[in-house]
Amino acid sequence: MGEARFTALVAASWKRYNAWEYSRRADDVALGAVITSYVSAGWRLIDLESDGTSHMVRFQAGQGTDRLLVRLVALCEDPVRARALGRLVEVQVAYGLRANDFSAIKQAIKDELKSNMVENASEPGVITVDGDMSTGYVYATVPLILDLDDYFDGFTVKAPIAGDLHVAAQSLHKYLTGRLAG
Amino acid sequence: MLKLLTDFAARSEARESRDEAVVGQIIAAMGRRGFPTIGFSTGLAEDSGFQAVQFATPADPVLHTLTVVLDRKTGGGAIQEKIIGSKATLRMVAEVKNFIADPDDLLAMWRTDARNILRMPMMGQVRLDHQLNTVTATKQILVELTEYDGPEDTQRVEQTLWALYGELRDALTPYKRASIVDDPM
């Protein structure tokens, strides 16, 4: 009788613990799904940084020089917050084009400095442009807030999150091409 | 001038990011097999060649998780890569977790745990490690990153991963016990 009760207590504890574990790992599941989609589509992973909560991946197009950067920060690892708000993640999508001249990169850096002084530059949907002098790239970046429950049911994919990131990247590409054209 | 500089930077970046490209291939191969990522560790700033990725194994009734660790040892610079290549150790750790509560089973597990505590991992061999309700099997091999980093290397990546996975899984199967809850991973 005592051992049966002990077993029931341990089993119930495991279930609660596992719910917590899943909540803590939902952002890692999403990051892996993004990498799997892009690498399987021919993009090359060229950068990966993670401290467990904040993740950054950078890809380069397999047949070109375009780059895609995805920064993903878990906002609701606590299961109580996740139940109240959803499994929210802040996602920054950046599309990078290799610039043909210094002036385009310089102008992009100037624009970025200006946008840093604007209060709403980090709000969802606001596109900012920045330049990377060392690699010769200009990036357009947009922040989004996504609910991972829209894309995953446990470990099962309901809808590919990379599909929505691709849509964002396409819009950024269009915007950036227009900006670089002047 | 800008093109010359950025071409040089691009070549250098491609060489430096060879280990990330291999990690990308590993994650994609695991994802296609139905093993999602559940943890990332990219090491300290001064050890940028270390990358560990943990996977859940929901399609496997024996294993709880798999961890793949890629630790780059050489090939960060052009001359070094030319002379000795881009070498890295690839370590896979397979984990069985037994969700048990019977005191007799727990005692048996503790005895095995104590017996194995001084075993050390060796290159090319499987090491078993018991830690209370967890048993892990580890194997480490040396790989040449240039043979694994391109889209044309997908098959080689998968062959290497599934060979390691099969060997570790076989070593762990005898240690899997009937659990009192479903394995969440």
Image (tube, coloured by chain):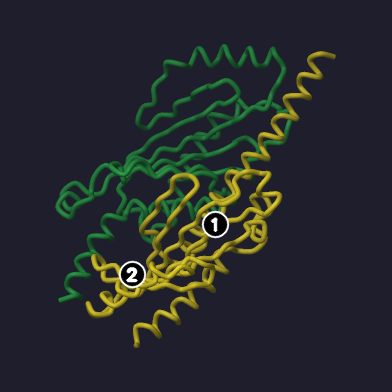
Q: How far across and how far down the image is residue A19, in percent?
A: 68, 40
**What's the residue at 31%, 44% (across, down)?**
B45
- Pick whichever, A111 or A33, lies toward us: A111
Q: CA distance from mark 1 to mark 2?
A: 33 Å
Residue assigned mark 2:
A113
The quarter of the picture where residue B18 lies is bottom left
Residue B39 appears left or right of B15: right
Please name the color used to draw chain A: yellow
Numbered badge on residue A123: none
Q: How far across and how far down the image is residue A65, in percent?
A: 33, 72
Labels 1, 2: front one: 2
Pinpoint the chain carrying mark 1: A
Neighbours of disc 2 within 10 Å: few (<14), some (14-19), many (20+): few
**What's the residue at 70%, 13% (across, down)?**
B103
A125 versus B154 height, above or below: below
* Quarter in which the N terminus of chain A is drawn: top right
